[in-house]
């Protein structure tokens, strides 16, 4: 094994190892239960079965295939298989990005590692990781098409869109990416014609032919029509925009917040932005118009919402690596690696692979501890044993976990599907949680009989002073009040 290959192997083994982590996403649990529900009932629900407050309300199951996939993996291999497969998905997404980057292996490796660390806070067993992969595949195929002018790289895109639209509503970014490439190709062809008429020197090899532009347009139209092939039909065209315009989701759900650069976890993203600016100013290498459009558009979205950072990073890594390669022209050595050193390199990779496996084992051993630390496991056990009368009011972040543990015996008040509950309901839920005036009436209307919340919640203090409620369970993490 040569030194460049050793570097690449170490890079991706390290990346895979970094992506392996305990499952702690609050929404993971209702995804898991939804997948089980669909497999066991052989149906895709179009109304909410999991909460009593939104019973029968429309539920756009835009992630239905992801949820079936997640539960199928869990049924076959438990948390171990889920963790390994999703870490592999994240690693593959970055491997495709690495393949699009100049300056391999060292400069591209630096850009990749910085970009990957910028996305680290978003990693996990989540449907969003499938959007990360599909976005990376789309960019890879489109870049190959622009480089080779070979339409065979466009053929998979509409077929992939059929999968993507059933996996996650992030499919919309795929259409945006294709539109950006098409727009860039059209603009560049017009500029080329006018420049040639003006007598300016132009390189025709950098411009798509009218035939290639038509092929890209036809592919975009086919991909747009492919969106219809989902259980919700044409409804999926507007669903992503309903999510983006939800005031409650933007205001209260953390992953929709702008990145806080005072927090250490977002510093790699800040460094990536600064590196892009610095290298572009110094190297001044031409950035393709399609990449420029996507950098500005996705950069705006990433600064507005942290959950969009991975999409921006997939475009930023190749741009950064190209600028670095233009500024630092490293030459690959043709000198063969001595046989003893090749053996040492293979042994080193084997050791690192073992470390990655040990990391997987450590994470799996610690999964139960993370679950106990982040979710009300003891309180759930008390409910399962004591069987208090429903209905159950619960903290927002625990709704998914309660769906996994208590459904169908108990349905939740609220969970992470903010789109199902709606902005008005979320606002009312928060009024109750903060013990605002009229909270007793708001709880009486749906006949809430049991409340599971954090001990330091404002509602917990109000319940402690209300003679209609009695505390029946408490620990350092949660408290349960029951109505007399």
Image (spheres, rainbow, N blue to C red):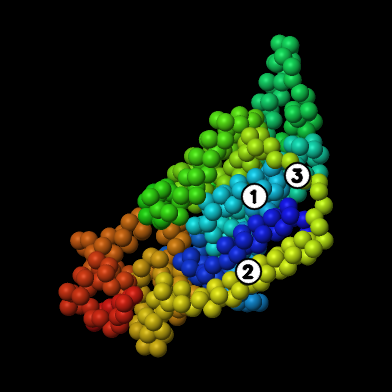
**Can residue 315 be seen here?**
no
Disc number for residue 82: none
Marks 1/2 in contact by CB < 8 Å: the verdict is: no
Q: Earlier in the sequence, mark 2 or mark 3?
A: 3
Q: What residue sits right under mark 2 in the picture? A: 356
From mark 2 to mark 3, how far is it between C-alphas? 29 Å
Which residue lies most toward the bottom here? 385
Count how many numbered circles sit on residues in the image. 3
Q: Disc 3 on helix, strand or loop? A: loop
Q: What residue sits right under mark 3 in the picture? A: 332
* Picture quadrant of residue 351: bottom right
Report the front residue among 403 and 313.
313
Residue visible at 60% across and 46% down in the picture = 111
Q: Please state if 307 lies on the left or on the right of 38 as rendered.
A: left
* Picture quadrant of residue 84: bottom right
Residue visible at 40% across and 53% down in the picture = 263
From mark 3 to mark 1, how far is it between C-alphas? 14 Å
User: Taking 4 as reference, is 328 above or below it?
Assistant: above
Looking at the rendered image, the quarter that the C terminus falls into is: bottom left
Percent of width and height locating residue 292: 60, 34
What crowding class fits label 2: few (fewer than 14 Cα within 10 Å), some (14-19), or many (20 or more)?
Answer: some
From mark 1 to mark 2, how far is it between C-alphas? 19 Å
Q: Earlier in the sequence, mark 3 or mark 1?
A: 1
* Picture quadrant of residue 177: top right
Residue visible at 76% across and 37% down in the picture = 147
Q: Disc 1 on helix, strand or loop? A: helix
Percent of width and height locating residue 398: 41, 69
Report the front residue among 304 and 30.
304
Percent of width and height locating residue 235: 56, 51
Q: Earlier in the sequence, mark 1 or mark 2?
A: 1
What crowding class fits label 3: few (fewer than 14 Cα within 10 Å), some (14-19), or many (20 or more)?
Answer: few
Disc number for residue 109: 1
């Amino acid at each position: 094994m040569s030194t460049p290959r050793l570097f690449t192997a170490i890079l991706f083994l390290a990346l895979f190892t970094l992506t392996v982590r305990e499952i702690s996403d609050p929404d993971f649990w209702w995804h898991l239960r939804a997948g089980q529900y669909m497999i066991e009932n052989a149906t895709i629900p179009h109304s909410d079965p999991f909460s009593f407050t939104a019973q029968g309300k429309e539920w756009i199951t835009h992630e239905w295939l992801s949820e079936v996939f997640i539960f199928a993996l869990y049924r076959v291999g438990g948390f171990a298989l889920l963790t390994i497969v999703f870490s592999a998905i994240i690693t593959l997404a970055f491997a495709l990005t690495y393949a699009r980057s100049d300056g391999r292996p060292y400069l591209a490796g630096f850009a990749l590692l910085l970009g990957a660390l910028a996305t680290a806070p978003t990693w996990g067993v989540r449907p969003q990781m499938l959007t990360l992969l599909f976005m990376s595949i789309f960019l890879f195929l489109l870049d190959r098409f622009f480089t080779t002018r070979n339409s065979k790289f466009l053929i998979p895109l509409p077929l992939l869109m059929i999968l993507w639209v059933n996996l996650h509503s992030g499919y919309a970014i795929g259409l945006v990416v294709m539109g950006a490439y098409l727009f860039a190709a059209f603009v560049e062809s017009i500029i080329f014609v006018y420049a040639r008429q003006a007598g300016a020197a132009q390189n025709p090899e950098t411009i798509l032919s009218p035939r290639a532009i038509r092929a890209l347009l036809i592919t975009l139209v086919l991909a747009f029509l492919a969106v219809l092939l989902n259980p919700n039909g044409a409804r999926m065209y507007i669903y992503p925009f309903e999510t983006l315009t939800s005031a409650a989701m933007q205001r209260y759900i953390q992953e929709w917040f702008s990145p806080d650069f005072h927090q250490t976890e977002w510093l790699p993203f800040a460094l990536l932005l600064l590196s892009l600016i610095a290298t572009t100013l110094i190297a001044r290498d031409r950035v393709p118009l399609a990449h420029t459009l996507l950098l500005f558009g996705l950069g705006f979205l990433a600064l507005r919402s942290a959950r969009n950072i991975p999409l921006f990073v997939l475009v930023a890594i190749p741009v950064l690596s190209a600028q670095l390669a233009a500024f630092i022209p490293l030459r690959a050595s043709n000198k063969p690696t001595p046989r003893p050193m090749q053996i040492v390199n293979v042994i080193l990779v084997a050791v690192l692979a073992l470390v990655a496996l040990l990391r997987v084992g450590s994470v799996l051993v610690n999964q139960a501890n993370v679950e106990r630390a982040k979710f009300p496991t003891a309180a759930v056990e008390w409910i399962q044993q004591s069987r208090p009368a429903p209905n159950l009011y619960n903290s927002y972040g625990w709704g998914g976990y309660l769906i996994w543990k208590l459904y169908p015996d108990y349905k939740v008040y609220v969970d992470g599907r903010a789109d199902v509950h709606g902005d008005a309901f979320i606002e009312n839920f928060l009024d109750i949680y903060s013990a605002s005036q009229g909270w007793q009436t708001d709880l009486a209307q749906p006949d809430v009989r049991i409340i599971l919340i954090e001990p330091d919640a404002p509602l917990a203090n109000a319940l402690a002073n209300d003679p209609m409620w009695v505390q029946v369970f408490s620990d350092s993490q949660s408290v349960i009040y029951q109505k007399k």
